[in-house]
Image (spheres, helix red, strand yellow):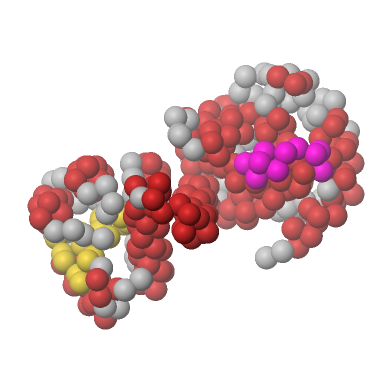
Amino acid sequence: MNAQQETLLIVDDEELIRQLLKVKFSAENYQCLTASNGIEAVELVKGIQVSVVLLDINMPGKTGIETLKEIKALRPDTEVIMATAINDIDVALKCIRLGAYDYAIKPFNLEVLIHITKRALEHRRLVLENREYQLGLEKKVVERTEELRRALNQLKEASLDTIFRLSRAAEYKDEDTGTHIRRIGHYVAEIANTMGLPSEQVEAFLYAAPMHDIGKIGIPDHILLKPGKLTPEEWEIMKQHTVIGASILEGATSEVIKQGAVIALNHHERWDGSGYPNGLKGGNIPLGGRITAIADVFDALTSKRPYRPSSFSVPEALKMIEANVGKQFDPEIYQALQGSLKNILTIRQSP
């Protein structure tokens, strides 16, 4: 990236924040513009090609979300990074679905904000390059096949980065859930591989399974983080995270996110039909949901959780899971869990 050629628009109703960010990013060789509200920002974007916009969500008058929609309509190639308070994480997630590249938490860690901005610029570069490749593909395909392959792989990685940022949203409410998210995709992929599933399906599960608990962002903190047993009323609310997660992810065009929606909805269904939310039974439960169910419970049993300060040993966890094979878990998947245990334990020891 040549930062001298990149224009950065800083939109915040607080003058001190605008000036602080302008000084910091100017020192990084960005051409910086500022706006104090959404109306000013939209007018600037109409007349100037801006590479990245740092946009505050909570501003008087035109809100950050309204401004985001107008900027993306005017300049689809402009990347937008939303600024939000920690208790607005559900709003930040909505902004990502509306086209924002990422979000930053106030008060800013300036080094982290600079890093996010550089990633946004790199993402923009890859998208523009891919568009150019597609337009000129017929005449360039012979001499640029290898270059195109590398660029598309990079674009795929950038798309997966968006998926993991969606999954990361749950970390802001429950750090234990955050580390769980980072492991669960690899556990599911190892089990699927042991079952002999096609590599394409294994890869889809690898990236989709981490989204299984995304719906927990919609569960109140006093329930999600409660150290003791939930009341029946609280438990009914907690169970809604499956439906919330599916509703967040449904309607996507990405096959991985579609699979994520299926897993989010079905990872608490039980083999005997006594699970939730729909009481599906046996093979009627989608395979991704069945595999994630056993990986989810294995990791939960062997990890400290808010409702249980100590964890079970691996042999204890396997014994507890085995007792529920044919009731909660698919017998074939339990065998695959045992067959992939060595690799799973290696993953568990990784930072």
Rendered residue at 22%/66% (across/down): 7
Q: Residue at position x 67%, y 38% from top?
A: 201
Image coordinates for residue 99, horizontal then vertical, percent: 33, 45
Q: Which residues are magenta?
A: 194-205
Any part of residue 157 in sight: no
**Residue 14 image-quadrant placement:** bottom left
Please state, as top left, top right, bottom left or bottom right, where the N terminus lies in the image.
bottom left
Please tell me which residue lies in front, 78 or 39: 78
Quarter of the view holding residue 204: top right
Q: Closer to the camera, 129 or 283?
A: 129
Q: With 9 as the anchor, is 216 left or right in this view?
A: right
Image coords of residue 65 (percent x, y): 26, 44
296 sits left or right of 118 in the view? right
In the image, taking residue 339 as reference, residue 148 lies left or right, namely left
Against 299, residue 53 (above or below) is below
In this view, the residue in front, 318 or 257, is 257
